[in-house]
Amino acid sequence: MYLDRIVETKREETAKLAATLSIPQALETIAGMPATKGFAKTLTAGRKRDMGLIAEVKKASPSKGLIRPDFDPVAIALAYEEAGADCLSVLTDAPYFQGSSEYLQAVRQAVNLPLLRKDFVIDERQIYEARILGADAVLLIAAILTPQQISTFMRTAASIGLDSLIEVHSLEEMKTVLELELSEGVLIGINNRNLHTFETSLAASESLGKLVPEGVPFISESGISSVQDMDFLRNTGASGVLIGECFMRQKDIQAAVNALMGPVGSAAKEGGVSIHE
Ligand SMILES: O=C(O)c1ccccc1NCC(=O)[C@H](O)[C@H](O)COP(=O)(O)O
């Protein structure tokens, strides 16, 4: 599976991180930083539309290659903020997504929105690093973590003010995650992308969303690109969506967000406006 390759790379990266990031020192740095911005709360109680939006700053991906050649992370983040995105996701993985930690730092300086560090967390140090880079939340991917690791990482994140988006792709992963004690500040992400074929199907959010207990918010991720998709997802009970590629392919990002999500403060328009290329 492609994820295995990514995890292998993360093992090399985290071995290097172990030599440069000391947890006691990281804690000292964090103690002097401003409080985080409440990623999960912003998407639930504080969202601007009927569906919350995590808009992704994404240059490239394993499935699609280069998505946005004229990639300016700060300009993209500002356009998302102007369009009323609730939160942003910034890819920091370099080898597979052409992301960068520097992008996350630059976006933190430029916008006031809560930020998700989008990477492949396999080591606690990456969580401390995320906080120092300016993130408000981390992604924990159930497919690459043991249940014990998810619990520990979730608690570590919370202890330094970070929320967690725990991502599942399958029924088995969903069952595992639902057996854990999920604290406030935790969101479940249902990824519509099949990790073997890279194909996306919103049916994943429909079927797995039914298992999520009342009171636990979930986010539908990947492969969302039309008003019809949004209408479909509204009926699954999702609190919000995570969208990258569809917006990254548009020249006018702000207009694209408004076309897909509807104006701030109202439900999205019904009907067939598609912003597919
Ligand atoms: O995007 C990929 O090709 C990919 C491949 C392997 C693992 C993860 C991958 N994507 C990460 C994501 O979760 C998406 O960037 C995110 O959900 C946004 O999806 P999209 O709107 O389809 O760009």
Image: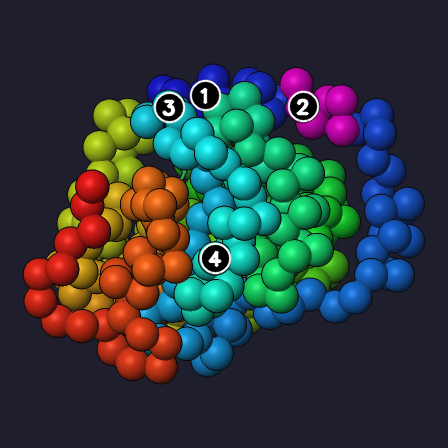
* 3 vs 4, front mark: 4
Mark 4 — residue?
A: 79
Task: Specify the label residue 65 is tagged with.
Answer: 3
First in sequence: mark 3 vs mark 1: 1
Span highlighted in magenta in the image: 12-17
- Seen from the viewer's position, the closer of residues 52 and 5 is 52
Q: Is mark 4 within 8 Å of ligand 1?
A: no
Q: Which numbered disc, 3 or 1, marks the residue closer to the eye?
A: 3
Q: Is residue 11 above or below residue 123?
A: above
Element at label 4 = helix
Q: Residues within 10 Å of mark 4 (few under 14, many from 20)?
A: some
Task: Tell me, yes or no, whether the highlighted magenta stretch contains residue 115.
Answer: no
Separation of residues labelled 1 and 2 (CA atoms): 14 Å
Could you tell me the amino acid type at mark 4?
Ala
Residue 154, image x, y percentages: 60, 54
Question: Is there CB contact under 8 Å for labels 3 and 1?
Answer: no
Q: Could you tell me which secondary element the residue under label 2 belongs to?
A: helix
**Residue 274 percent across, percent down from the top left:** 15, 54
The residue indicated by pointer 2 is 13
Residue at disc 3, secondary structure: strand
Tell me the crowding category of disc 1: few under 14, some 14 to 19, or many 20 or more residues within 10 angstroms, Cα based: few
User: Quick check: 159 left or right of 25?
Assistant: left
- Near-viewer residue (138 or 214): 138
- What whole-number distance in Å separates the C-alpha atoms at marks 2 and 3? 22 Å
The amino acid type of the residue labelled 3 equals Gly
Residue at the image point whose x is 42% and y is 65% from the top: 83
Q: CA distance from mark 4 to mark 1?
A: 34 Å
Residue 189, percent from left and from top: 39, 53
CA gap, disc 4 and disc 2? 31 Å
